[in-house]
Image: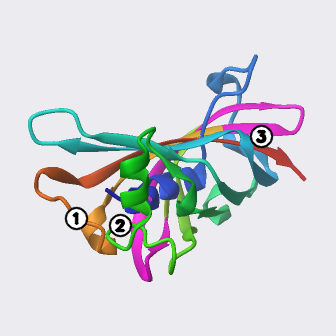
Amino acid sequence: MSVHVFGRVLGAAALIAVGLLGDTASAVALSDAAGRYAVSNNGSSIRFAIGKIGGGGLSGAFGQFKGTIRIDGGDIARSKVDITIFPESVGTGQGRIDAFLKSDAVFDVANSREITFRSTSVRRTGDNSAVITGQLTARGHTNTEKFTAELQGLKGGQIRFRVSGQVFRSRYQMDVGTPIYSNIVAFDMEFSGRRG
């Protein structure tokens, strides 16, 4: 299993994530959300899942991360997303699996304390959606990943996005357990941030 998925998801996340209370996605356009937002752990989440032959699989989340989202109202393509994930915070609800994920077999948290995503391009796909492409770095390996993002709400200077994507674990030397466990990590992320 791996944070690489994070890469893909982050990429997508890079562009955005979750819905805001009382707002509907159709009522808010990316161009209305111009500004710089700091991602808050409160109201945000980075979840991942890895399939397994015969069913089941593994799922979990990262409890600690930070980031900024800058939306250019004049040209969405010039928007930027920066996300940092702390793999030490990975959690699956099973202590033995968490310890394995933190070991040098997967995230190697003793030597690789951060996973980062830095957007390189944003391509608008609708009034409130975009594809975010960027560089995902984990365990010293950097690859280009893509994520899809959807603006879910904007109210009182607070924004919410939903981001999703898939990352190949093998690209980050985290493909232990394949082919029994899928090489693909699916990310489902929600980001909440305040303009400022």
Using residue 132 as the reference point, say whether residue 63 is left or right of it. Answer: right
Residue 176: which numbered mark, if any?
1
Q: Which residue reaches farthest front?
A: 96
Q: According to the image, label 2 marks what residue?
A: 106
Question: Residue 93 occupies which quadrant of the picture?
Answer: top left
Disc nearest the viewer among 1 and 3:
1
Q: How busy is the neighbourhood of tag 1: few (under 14 within 10 Å), some, or many (20 plus)? A: some
Are the residues tagged 3 and 2 within 8 Å (C-beta)? Answer: no
**Where 194 sits versus 143, above or below?**
above
140 in the magenta segment: yes
First reached walking from the N terminus: tag 1 or tag 3: 3
Q: How busy is the neighbourhood of tag 3: few (under 14 within 10 Å), some, or many (20 plus)? A: some
Are the residues tagged 1 and 3 within 8 Å (C-beta)? Answer: no
Disc nearest the viewer among 3 and 2:
2
Q: Residue at x 41, y 64 (%)?
A: 145
* Relative image position of residue 124 (x, y in whole percent): 54, 50
59 in the magenta segment: no
Are the residues tagged 2 and 1 within 8 Å (C-beta)? Answer: yes
Residue 97 seen in the current view: yes
First reached walking from the N terminus: tag 3 or tag 2: 3
Q: How busy is the neighbourhood of tag 2: few (under 14 within 10 Å), some, or many (20 plus)? A: many
Q: Which residues are magenta?
A: 134-160
